[in-house]
Amino acid sequence: MPQTERNKRQAIIDHCLRMNSSGLNQGTSGNISIRHDDGLLISPTSTPYADLTPEKIAYVHMDGRVEGPIAPSSEWRFHRDVLASRDDVNAIVHAHPTYCTILAIHGREIPPIHYMVAIFGGPNIRVARYAIYGSQALSDHAVAALEDRQACLLDHHGSIAVGASIEQAFWRAEELEALARQYHGALLLGEPPLLTEQQIQDVIDKISGYGLTKTEVD
Ligand code: 13P
């Protein structure tokens, strides 16, 4: 296996482990993919992350053909469809983070409660409509909710964060959960005041070269 491919497979494993050790996710509820050749490398379905090896990472062609000793994540459709529809995306992190999921259960998108909402591309983070996990319908809803955005919530399910690199997608997944937690806390004091769309646009203009907001493609 070429070293670059092995590195991507190992990066999926490393970030799956980080996803759980950081408290972002639990069990095998999440899945991670990285664009590769004409398809994507993706964590296999229902496999404890501690048991993963580079060889167990699945490969899915854009036409849906699958390779690997274990079936790909049941969510391979939205990973594939987001990568197919977005040239700017090379990696995807899906998880069931507690605060993102609390908001998603209520169907509450995240409004501009904090300037960091801007790193997701606009004044809100949408909630994709509910459809059963692993379905084409869920994938269609996720692609729609991600239009012009770098993350979305999934109704009664969890979150998706995307990036030009796995580091960037993971950073966004963590920042999204922080925002969800802040919004949840702010709601405890009442309906919070919001930043304006112009204030978010000003941050988008200012922050584009900052840290992991930069495009990093390996
Ligand atoms: P997988 O174990 O198939 O990746 O599924 C977990 C999940 O999050 C379904 O939404």
Image: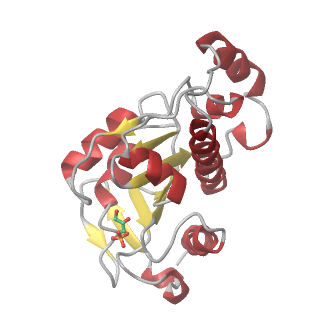
Q: Does 17 sit above or below residue 167?
A: below
**Residue 75 in the image: x percent, y percent?**
32, 61
- The residue at 77%/31% (across/down) is 209
- The residue at 42%/69% (across/down) is 29
Judge by depth and name the residue closer to the eye, 195 or 5.
195
Q: Does 15 sit above or below residue 119?
A: below
Residue 83 can be seen, yes or no: no
- Tell me which image quadrant ligand 1 sits in: bottom left
Toward which corner of the image does residue 193 lie, by quadrant? top right
Q: Is residue 203 left or right of residue 100?
A: right
**Residue 44 in the image: x percent, y percent?**
38, 75
**Residue 134 in the image: x percent, y percent?**
25, 60
- The residue at 36%/79% (across/down) is 46
Q: Does 205 sit above or below residue 88?
A: above
Q: How many marks?
A: 0
Residue 37 can be seen, yes or no: yes
**Residue 108 in the image: x percent, y percent?**
42, 37
- The residue at 50%/50% (across/down) is 100
Judge by depth and name the residue closer to the eye, 123 or 111.
111
